[in-house]
Amino acid sequence: MTHSRRDFLFSLGCGLGGLALTQLLAEAGELPGVAKPKAEFNGGLHHVAKVKRVVQLFMNGGVSQMDTFDYKPALEKGHGKPFDPGTPEKPEGVTSTPGNLMKSPFKFAQHGQCGRWVSSVFPHLATQVDRMAFLMAVASKTNVHGPASYMMNTGFILPGFPCMGAWFSYGLGRLTNNLPTFVVLPDARGLPYNQKGNFGSGFLPVAHAGTILNANGNPPIPDLASSSKEKFVTPDADKDAIELLGKVNRNHADTRPNDSRLESRIESYELAAKMQKHAPEALDLSREAAKTRAKYGLDEPATADFGRRCLLARRLLERGTRFVQVWSGAGGPANNWDNHGDIIKELPPIAHSVDQPAAALLQDLHDRGMLSDTLVVFSTEFGRQPFTQGATGRDHNQGTSVAWMAGAGVKGGVSYGESDPWSWRTETNRTYCYDLHATILHLMGIDHTLLSVRHDGTDRRLTDVHGHVIEKILS
């Protein structure tokens, strides 16, 4: 008689206890078919890891690169004139007819020892540029929000593929058994384009999908603990319920031997039980000093939401969460970085909401010694056009955008790639999401070409069949 992996799991014990024991055996290298991690790899899967944990700040809607980090004197010279790139490619708008060239309405200045140009919309982040490695020529394969957001998060423009956080969880596992490995902190105003699809597990087990926390909720995780009004919920009652659940799950598994969702559901129950004890402390920002809360901008309405989530991200990272995504901007025509109507009025408020909190996060990680093994990533789905939409708006631009990385394994104050004189298209060292993902995986001790899963007859990976590690920005 043959036994499936699921049968083996349940033979170890009932329900949650069985999975807990299995996790311990796997970590000890005593589970059949599972190799023990090599200590000399520093937590990496294929080589020495420089990064243990990642926080990604994702700007939903398409940040205007020529109004933030990509200073272009040519736009000032050509302001108000028709755009002629001098190439066979005809300038086209995505949702509008192209207008004339428009210079940035915001003042640029050089900052830091590296002399990085930053506009006036990011005064706090400008103080951190010597810690950042800028990717100045990030291109996309689409100028539509949904597919572009999928591409930057999963490596594909179509739905159904695992996001980067899910691959981290699948490839490296947990740093702690008490908190989720992959946490998503969406904007309080709503989920981004694609809703939960940006942080899904695709064809990987559901347990690797992002755990969504409502940072403004009270509590942030609903139904984590039973109501004090329900007196019948006791430790003995919980024990009986778990035993009954184990029996039901075994019967369910016997009739569905190829359904991995059951194991994921059991694992979620196990994690929820542990989070009842550990999550309240991790999510309690009142434990932070008033000075720290002020640095993140929690005392100012405009920065309080993003600041709260950045501070929560730091607390989760230092307690063992491996990957945290902090989103700025909801899906839809407003409350994000999709500045079609008026760049002058629309960009400063959204930039202001993230500027102080993001800079505070970088400084806080540094002051706590966490930047030595933490990577911070700032990205968006695409850029914006150098010509006007309407009077002073900017349309979508897949041709070029800006991202930056800071922290472990990254050179500070450097840049890679360059856009053309108008920030319309990439000119040198074009970078795609594949290269960004490959570089992040590399820093975490993973060879992006080796982390793959056989799905529908194809060896799938985060970087598809593309991707190069950007060596020039690595320390």
Image (spheres, rainbow, N blue to C red):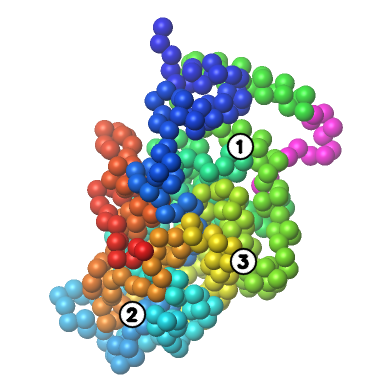
Q: Quadrant of the C terminus?
A: bottom left
The residue that disc 1 covers is 271
Separation (CA) of disc 1 from disc 3: 27 Å
Badge 2 density bin: few <14, some 14–19, many ≥20, Cα 10 Å: many
Label whose residue precedes the other's in the sequence (1 or 2): 1
Q: Residue most toward the top?
A: 1
Residue 383 visible in this rendered orientation of the protein: no
Separation (CA) of disc 1 from disc 2: 48 Å
Which kind of residue does numbered mark 2 sit on? Pro
Q: Quadrant of the N terminus?
A: top left
User: Looking at the image, which residue is at 76% across and 24% down?
Assistant: 237
Which segment is the magenta one?
Answer: 220-234
Left or right of 117? Residue 420 is left
Q: Residue 116 colored magenta? A: no
Residue 386, which numbered label?
Answer: 2
At which x and y percent is residue 12? 55, 18
Which kind of residue does numbered mark 1 sit on? Leu
The residue nearer to you, when weighing 357 against 413, is: 413
At which x and y percent is residue 373? 48, 56
